[in-house]
Image (cartoon, grey):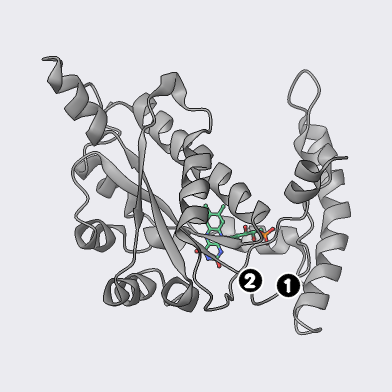
Amino acid sequence: MNDTIRLLQNHRSIRKFLTTPVERDKLDAILQSGQMASTSSNMQAYSIIGIEDAELRKQLASLCGNQIYVEQCPVFLVWCADLHRLSAVAALHGTEAQADTTEYFVIATVDTALAAQNAAIAAESLGLGVVYIGGIRNRISEVADLLQLPERVYPVFGMCLGYPDQAPVLRPRLPLAAVYHQDAYRIDSELPAVAEYDETTREYMTARSQGRTSRSWSEQMAEKMGNPSRLHMQSFLTKKGFLKR
Ligand SMILES: Cc1cc2nc3c(=O)[nH]c(=O)nc-3n(C[C@H](O)[C@H](O)[C@H](O)COP(=O)(O)O)c2cc1C
């Protein structure tokens, strides 16, 4: 193994941060590392909004489902898929951007996630901790208004960043056999590996909750998947000019 692999396999989300500020040069290096992620056709179809204003942070923490670390973390970034800049760039050359397609939506969303994850790894390599905040989509329309997001820009997730003030235990993942298929998708291999993982997650949950719960992963996922979740997304995205065809 090497240091990079050790770093990647040591990831855990951090939800409690020291008040120590993140140095500007470190933050710049983190963001520039994010920018160096692969990007579809070099489109770089994302924008990052750093939320420095305290009042704005408070409002966002509330819109994200009262996740207190959104307010308290030293750095909060909102990672947005962005086809607005590309539309403006196309217009420079008299071209009307065809930005309302499902394919461009996928490209912009993937670009955003790749850049964010590169930034997350850069941050962790500097001793910082991160947690993604999908809660930014709980009340996405209000978030978009608050951040003055133009047409064809949507917040994919937020990200808290800072020096960790906790050392959570590593959250185990599915056995590789559950997620890796050779040559073709094999439905038969799905559930045996999950049964093994359920045992692992029961132990993890028991330890993490000091015995209060021992729910298995499949039980947690059954509850999650039984909920359609954020049904406002489709109408929000089409209103913002995405996913029309
Ligand atoms: C897109 C995305 C959105 C997430 N949203 C939240 C969130 O709103 N709040 C939170 O506490 N954790 C959030 N997480 C963190 C996940 O819960 C966490 O990554 C997962 O449980 C695995 O744990 P680990 O990162 O500690 O290994 C999010 C992660 C991702 C990738």
Question: Looking at the rendering, in which quadrant would you find the N terminus?
Answer: top right
Q: Residue at x 41, y 75 (%)?
A: 71
Does the CB distance between marks 2 and 1 fall below 8 Å?
A: yes
Considering every residue shown, the one lying at the far left of the view is 94
Give the class, few, some or many, for how many residues have Cα within 10 Å of label 1's Cα (few <14, many ≥20): few
Q: Is mark 2 within 8 Å of ligand 1?
A: no
| Residue, disc 1 | 167
The number of numbered discs placed on residues in the rendered structure image is 2
Q: Quadrant of residue 101?
A: top left
Image quadrant of ligand 1 equals bottom right
Q: Is residue 213 above or below residue 135?
A: below
The structure residue drawn at horizontal position 79% and vertical position 42%, both measured from the top left corner, is 5
Regarding residue 79, the answer to whether it shows in the image is yes
Above or below: residue 3 compared with residue 127: above
Looking at the image, is 165 positioned above or below residue 96? Answer: below
Q: Is residue 30 left or right of residue 146?
A: right
Name the residue located 23 percent from the left edge and 35 percent from the top edge: 84
Q: Quadrant of residue 126?
A: bottom right
Between residue 178 and residue 63, name the one nearer to us.
Answer: 63
* Marks 2 and 1, how far apart at CA: 7 Å
| Residue 184, image x, y percentages | 75, 20
Question: Where's residue 81, x and y in %?
Answer: 36, 41
Q: Which residue is mark 2?
A: 164
Q: Amino acid at mark 1?
A: Ala
Between residues 109 and 196, which one lies in front from this camera angle?
109
Q: Is residue 214 visible?
A: no
Residue at mark 1: C-beta within 8 A of ligand 1: no
